[in-house]
Amino acid sequence: MRRRTKSLREKCALWAAFMAAGLHSTAQDGLAGINEADQKVRSYFEPGTNLMYAVGAILGLIGAVKVYQKWNSGDQDTGKVAAAWFGSCIFLVVVATVIKSFFGV
Protein backbone atom coordinates (compact mmCIF):
# COMPACT_ATOMS: atom_id res chain seq x y z
CA MET A 1 0.00 0.00 0.00
CA ARG A 2 1.03 3.50 -0.64
CA ARG A 3 1.45 5.90 2.29
CA ARG A 4 -0.47 9.05 2.04
CA THR A 5 1.81 12.11 2.03
CA LYS A 6 0.76 15.46 3.29
CA SER A 7 0.50 18.26 0.84
CA LEU A 8 2.95 21.12 0.95
CA ARG A 9 0.24 23.46 2.20
CA GLU A 10 -0.54 21.18 5.16
CA LYS A 11 3.15 20.85 6.03
CA CYS A 12 3.64 24.63 5.96
CA ALA A 13 0.54 25.26 8.07
CA LEU A 14 1.68 22.70 10.63
CA TRP A 15 5.19 24.15 10.73
CA ALA A 16 3.84 27.70 11.13
CA ALA A 17 1.58 26.60 14.00
CA PHE A 18 4.50 24.98 15.83
CA MET A 19 6.69 28.03 15.29
CA ALA A 20 3.99 30.45 16.47
CA ALA A 21 3.39 28.39 19.61
CA GLY A 22 7.11 28.17 20.31
CA LEU A 23 7.77 31.86 19.72
CA HIS A 24 4.83 32.90 21.84
CA SER A 25 5.98 30.84 24.82
CA THR A 26 9.61 31.98 24.62
CA ALA A 27 8.73 35.63 24.00
CA GLN A 28 7.04 35.87 27.39
CA ASP A 29 10.12 34.48 29.15
CA GLY A 30 12.33 36.90 27.22
CA LEU A 31 10.23 39.90 28.20
CA ALA A 32 10.29 38.87 31.85
CA GLY A 33 14.08 38.52 31.70
CA ILE A 34 14.51 41.90 30.02
CA ASN A 35 12.26 43.59 32.59
CA GLU A 36 14.15 41.94 35.45
CA ALA A 37 17.50 43.04 33.99
CA ASP A 38 16.14 46.57 33.55
CA GLN A 39 15.10 46.73 37.21
CA LYS A 40 18.46 45.40 38.40
CA VAL A 41 20.44 47.88 36.31
CA ARG A 42 18.25 50.78 37.45
CA SER A 43 18.78 49.77 41.08
CA TYR A 44 22.53 50.39 40.66
CA PHE A 45 22.17 53.92 39.26
CA GLU A 46 21.60 55.76 42.54
CA PRO A 47 24.50 54.11 44.42
CA GLY A 48 26.69 54.53 41.32
CA THR A 49 26.03 58.25 41.04
CA ASN A 50 26.56 58.70 44.77
CA LEU A 51 29.89 56.89 44.39
CA MET A 52 30.84 59.24 41.56
CA TYR A 53 29.99 62.25 43.73
CA ALA A 54 32.12 60.81 46.55
CA VAL A 55 35.07 60.18 44.21
CA GLY A 56 34.70 63.74 42.92
CA ALA A 57 34.80 65.09 46.47
CA ILE A 58 37.91 63.07 47.30
CA LEU A 59 39.58 64.21 44.09
CA GLY A 60 38.68 67.78 44.97
CA LEU A 61 40.33 67.50 48.36
CA ILE A 62 43.46 65.85 46.95
CA GLY A 63 43.63 68.44 44.19
CA ALA A 64 43.24 71.30 46.66
CA VAL A 65 46.15 69.98 48.72
CA LYS A 66 48.35 69.52 45.62
CA VAL A 67 47.53 73.00 44.32
CA TYR A 68 48.20 74.51 47.76
CA GLN A 69 51.60 72.79 47.91
CA LYS A 70 52.54 74.03 44.43
CA TRP A 71 51.33 77.52 45.24
CA ASN A 72 53.40 77.66 48.46
CA SER A 73 56.50 76.36 46.72
CA GLY A 74 56.19 79.03 44.02
CA ASP A 75 55.79 76.75 41.00
CA GLN A 76 54.91 78.47 37.74
CA ASP A 77 52.36 75.86 36.61
CA THR A 78 50.02 76.20 39.59
CA GLY A 79 47.16 77.49 37.43
CA LYS A 80 47.45 74.59 35.01
CA VAL A 81 47.42 72.01 37.83
CA ALA A 82 44.45 73.74 39.49
CA ALA A 83 42.52 73.73 36.22
CA ALA A 84 43.25 70.03 35.68
CA TRP A 85 42.08 68.97 39.16
CA PHE A 86 39.05 71.24 39.09
CA GLY A 87 38.15 70.01 35.60
CA SER A 88 38.28 66.37 36.68
CA CYS A 89 35.92 67.06 39.58
CA ILE A 90 33.49 68.94 37.35
CA PHE A 91 33.67 66.11 34.80
CA LEU A 92 32.64 63.51 37.39
CA VAL A 93 29.69 65.59 38.58
CA VAL A 94 28.51 66.32 35.03
CA VAL A 95 28.82 62.67 33.99
CA ALA A 96 26.79 61.52 36.99
CA THR A 97 24.08 64.10 36.27
CA VAL A 98 23.95 63.34 32.55
CA ILE A 99 23.70 59.59 33.18
CA LYS A 100 20.80 60.11 35.59
CA SER A 101 18.93 62.40 33.20
CA PHE A 102 19.72 60.34 30.07
CA PHE A 103 18.36 57.10 31.49
CA GLY A 104 15.48 58.79 33.31
CA VAL A 105 16.41 57.50 36.73
Image (tube, grey):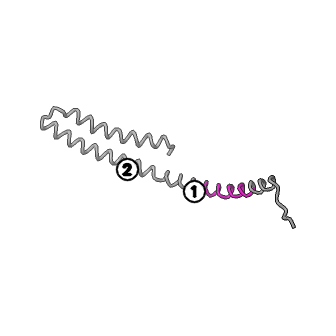
**Label 1: few (<14), some (14–19) or many (≥20) C-alpha neighbours in 10 Å:** few
* Secondary element at image label 1: helix
Which residue occupies 74% across, 56% down?
15
**Label 2: few (<14), some (14–19) or many (≥20) C-alpha neighbours in 10 Å:** few
As drawn, 87 above or below 46: above
**Residue 94 sits in quarter:** top left
Which residue occupies 36% across, 46% down?
53
Residue 10, position in %: x, y?
81, 55
On the image, numbered disc 2 is attached to which residue?
Answer: 51
> Quick check: is 60 in the magenta stretch?
no
Magenta residues, dominant SS class: helix
**Sooner in the amino-acid sequence: mark 1 or mark 2:** 1
In the rendered structure, the answer to whether residue 18 lies left or right of residue 57 reads right
Q: Nearer the viewer, residue 64 or 33?
A: 33
> Quick check: is 22 in the magenta stretch?
yes
In the rendered structure, the answer to whether residue 57 lies left or right of residue 38 reads left
On the image, numbered disc 1 is attached to which residue?
Answer: 33
As drawn, 54 above or below 4: above
Q: Residue furthest right?
A: 1
Observer-side mark, 1 or 2, equals 1
Residue interval drawn in magenta? 17-30
Q: Residue furthest bottom?
A: 1
What is the quadrant of the N terminus in the image?
bottom right
Q: Nearer the viewer, residue 76 or 104?
A: 76
